[in-house]
Image (cartoon, rainbow, N blue to C red):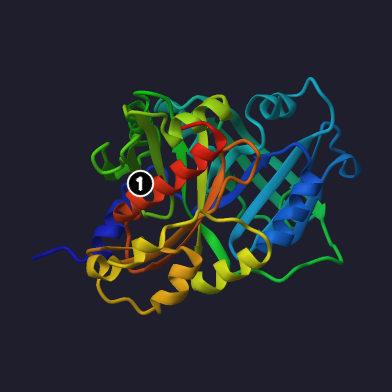
Amino acid sequence: MSTSVAEKVAQETANDFLPLQGTDYVEFYVGNAKQAAHFYKTAFGFQSVAYAGPETGVKEKASYVIRQNKLTFVLTTPLKTDNPIADHIYKHGDGVKVLALRVDDAKDAWEQTTKRGGKSYLEPTTLKDNDGEIVLSGIHTYGDTVHIFVERKNYKGAFMPGFRKWETNYNPSGTGLLYVDHCVGNVGWNQMNPWVKFYEDVMGFRNILSFDDKDISTEYSALMSKVMSNGNGFVKFPINEPAEGKKKSQVEEYLDFYNGEGVQHVAIATHNIIETVTELKRRGVEFLKIPPTYYETILDRVGKIDEDLQPLSELGILIDRDDEGYLLQIFSKPLEDRPTLFFEIIQRKGAKSFGKGNFKALFEALEREQELRGNL
């Protein structure tokens, strides 16, 4: 008798020593959090949620929490030098520090991961205020990036203790961004497999897809990538490393300018990519340009799709298909002056994959940008 899909998922979840409920928030260390919050609200349609800083008893930093649907960003800036946050920004520029994962038991998550070889970043800590309590714990991952486990089942406040509700008169409408689909890390030469092993051994993830330099290459550069997923599939972390090519790859450029390993991009889900990207572009968000020739044969490759090809080609949205359906995706230009962090907007119409058929077109677009910067 064959096992049903539901039974299989239930079985895998039962065996999962680190059950994750999804991404709780992504925290960025930035040079000016007040201005960054204004940018993300204006350009991407986030809403004000919570604030922590000197007025709430926090002396060394200020943090602004913004949210759109289930997508929560924390923007944190140092208030003085000689401070780990200031050091992080000096070394990396603005970038992702924390990929926070929601759990039912943060103490158990810390114990399970550290006993399997994870390096502790934050021992289990309980924060309390009048709205209840939150338990946090954390471990280190690649570069200076960390995972914080967040247990918030006994908390009903805006974000967490130490923050106050942040209400503003300026609240632009949303752009249809829903939640984190996946987060991609760039690691150094020959470091992909060690980090794959870390996610397997320490966090119980499994490698669900692999791409080698034959899959991801252009005339000039190449990279390799493996996609790691937790048991229930709510959290996915593709990991990229550079591969040998005639010229410098986008991963090498990232490693040079970020000054080490880190989060390359955050992929954000939407239900209507045409509406979302149209609005983001209207608000000034810049995306990679795809040559019109891409669309001449695209339907021969991906088959019938629900959307009209005209707006997709005008916006530069890429299309790919796997055994379960298709997806639509687009990549922003870097959000900082350093060519490091960028965003992906993705709409899944059944597809579980990551756009393998688009890699060549995407990387050629990235290389055109690299060439303009003199970094190819």
**How many numbered callouts?**
1
- Which quadrant would residue 367 be assigned to in this image? top left
Where 53 sits versus 249, above or below?
A: below
Q: Residue furthest left?
A: 1
Name the foreground residue: 267 vs 101.
267
Whether residue 123 is visible here, answered yes or no, is yes
Residue neighbourhood size for the residue with mark 1, other residues' Cα within 10 Å, grouped as few (<14), some (14–19), many (≥20):
some
> Is the residue 359 above or below the residue 262 in the image?
below
Task: Say whether residue 309 is left or right of residue 163.
Answer: left
Seen from the viewer's position, the closer of residues 196 and 187 is 187
- Residue 271 x, y percent position in the rendering: 49, 72
Left or right? Give the position of 59 relative to 303.
right
Q: Secondary structure at mark 1?
A: loop
| In-front residue for pair 75/242 | 242
Question: In the image as oriented, which residue stretches furthest toward the right?
Answer: 55
Give the residue drawn at x 43%, y 27%: 115
What percent of the width, then of the height, locates residue 220?
Answer: 34, 35
Give the camera-side residue of 13 and 309.
309
Point 61% across, 30% down: residue: 122
Q: What residue appears at the point 39 percent right and 32 percent down from the top-left corner? A: 202
- Quarter holding the N terminus is bottom left
Q: Is residue 156 visible?
A: no
Residue beneath the point at 33% across and 28% down: 246
* Residue type at numbered disc 1: Asp
- Name of the residue lying farthest toward the top: 82
Q: Position of residue 265 (x, y in %)?
A: 51, 45
**Location of mark 1 (residue):** 16
Instruction: Indicate the position of residue 107 as horizontal and vertical percent values.
Output: 54, 38
